[in-house]
Image (spheres, grey):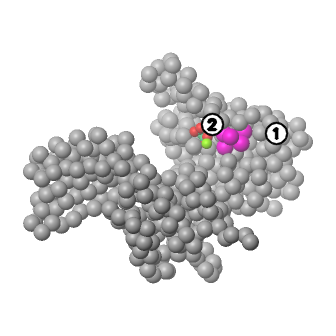
Amino acid sequence: MSLIVQKFGGTSVGTIERIQSVADKVAAFRAQGHDIVVAVSAMSGETNRLIGLANEMEEQPTPRELDVLVSTGEQVTIALLSMALNKRGCEARSYTGSQVRILTDSVHNKARIKSIDDANIRSDLDAGRVVVVAGFQGADENGNITTLGRGGSDTTAVAIAAALGADECQIYTDVDGVYTTDPRVVDSARRLDRITFEEMLEMASLGSKVLQIRAVEFAGKYNVPLRVLHSFQDGPGTLISLEDDKTMETPAISGIAFTRDEAKLSILGVPDIPGVAYRILGPVSDSNVEVDVIVQNIGADKTNDITFTVHRNDLAKAESILSATANELGAREVITDSKIAKVSIVGVGMRSHAGIASKMFKTLADVGINIELITTSEIKISVVINEKFLELAVRSLHSAFDLDEAVVE
Ligand code: ASP
Ligand code: MG
C-alpha cells in the first residue's frame, strides 16, 4: 500500500457539498488501504475576502496580523473535511500548520518552509487515521503564524510529501491535467500523460498556471512525483516526474507556452565598450523591474543596440529609467513596443532531436509571422512576435509539432 498526499484547492472545497464529495473520494482511497494525508486550501474566494477585510482596516495591513487573519481560511476547511470523513467512518484528524509543526522563516506573507516535524502525522497514520493539514501556512521559530504566498497550499502538499517520503503527491484541481497548450486557444490541445519537472517549470513560468511554481521546484528538488488530477472527474491526470530514460520515444516538443503581457524596449546606438550593458540594465533591475529576454546587436559603426522585454505593467517605469540612461550614454534613440507576445516551444526531447529551431522558424514563416526576438535554452525556444499573431503562431506550432489530439474517426 502507498503513502499518498492529496491536495484539494479552493474550488474543490468551495461549498459543503463539495467538501462532502472530497470526503467521499478520500474515504474511498483510504478504504483501498492507502495511508493518506490531505492538504486543503480555503474555500474559494475566502482568502480574497479576508484580504479585503484587512484592506478595509489598514491601507497596508500589518504583515504579521494579515497572516493571522488569512490563515483562518484553511482552518475552516480542515475542520469541515475532518468532520465529513469521521461521519463516513473514516477516522480523521485536522492540524493547522503550526500544530503539525511546519516550521518556516519569519518572512510574513511569503514565508519559506524550513522543516516539517512528522511526528504527529506519523502517529496518526500509524493509528489508521487520515491526517488533514491546513495548506498555505506554518509558524516561525517563535510560533508566529506565517503564510507561504498565494497558491501556497500546493507547496504545503509537496513539502509534506517530501518530508514523509510519500509515493505520490496528488494535486486535485479544476482541470484534468496539464495540457500541451491552453485549450482556450487551441481546441485540439491534448492532456499530457506525463511531463518532466523541468518542462513543467518552463510551462508554468510561461503562463500555464496549473501549479504554483515553487511547488514544482520543490517537487523536482526532492524528487516527489506529482500528479495533477480533476477533483470531480475520474481520469489518470498528468504525472510530473524526473526524466525517464526508459521512455523510448520522447516527443521533440511537449508543449507550447505563451504570454501576452510583455513589452519591448530598445536603446539604439550605445557605445560598444565594457560596462554599457550593466549601465543600461542595472538601474532597471535596481528598480525591481523584472527583465525577461535580452538581445544585443552589434552595429557597423562601433555602436550597439540593446533590446529587452519586461512585463507590460512595468513598461512606463522601465521607459523612464531607460530614457535617463540614454541621455547619459548619448544613445541615439529609445523605442518601445507594448504590443508583443512571447511564444515558446518546450521539451526535453529537444536535446536529442535536431532541427527543432529551424522547424519552428519555418512554421512561422509559412504563415507570414515576423519574428522580432529569439532566445533559447536547453529545453526551450522562445520567439517574441507581434501580439496580433499570437493565436495563429500557437495553433500553427501546435500542429507542426504533432501535438494535436488525434481525431477519433
Ligand atoms: N488559500 C490560499 C490562496 O488562495 C492558498 C491556496 O489556495 O493555495 O492563495
Ligand atoms: Mg489555490
Question: Ligand 1: does it lie within 8 Å of the C-beta at label 1?
Answer: no
Q: Is residue 334 visible?
A: yes
Q: Is residue 173 left or right of residue 320?
A: right
State the residue at coordinates (37%, 41%): 313
First in residue order: circle 1 vs circle 2 = 1
| Image quadrant assignment for residue 318 | top left
Q: Amino acid at mark 2?
A: Ser
- Where residue 326 sits in the image (x, y, percent)? 15, 48
* Ligand 2 visible in quadrant: top right
Foreground of the two, 377 or 367: 367
Q: Is residue 40 left or right of residue 267?
A: right
Image: 102 above or below 307: above
Q: Secondary structure at mark 2?
A: helix
Foreground of the two, 66 or 319: 319
Q: How would you rate the neighbour count of disc 2 (Cα within 10 Å): few for under 14, some for 14-19, many for 20 or more? A: many
Residue hosting label 1: 20
Q: How would you rate the neighbour count of disc 1 (Cα within 10 Å): few for under 14, some for 14-19, many for 20 or more? A: some
State the residue at coordinates (81%, 43%): 21
- Where residue 9 sits in the image (x, y, percent)? 66, 43
State the residue at coordinates (48%, 75%): 350
Magenta span: 9-13
State the residue at coordinates (60%, 56%): 183
Q: Quadrant of the image for the N terminus?
A: bottom right
Q: CA distance from mark 1 to mark 2?
A: 26 Å
Q: Secondary structure at mark 1?
A: helix
Q: Is residue 366 left or right of residue 241?
A: left
Residue hosting label 2: 98
Image: 233 above or below 363: above
Our reading of the magenta stretch's main secondary structure is helix
| Image quadrant assignment for residue 178 | bottom right
- Where residue 65 sits in the image (x, y, percent)? 52, 25
Q: Amino acid at mark 1?
A: Gln
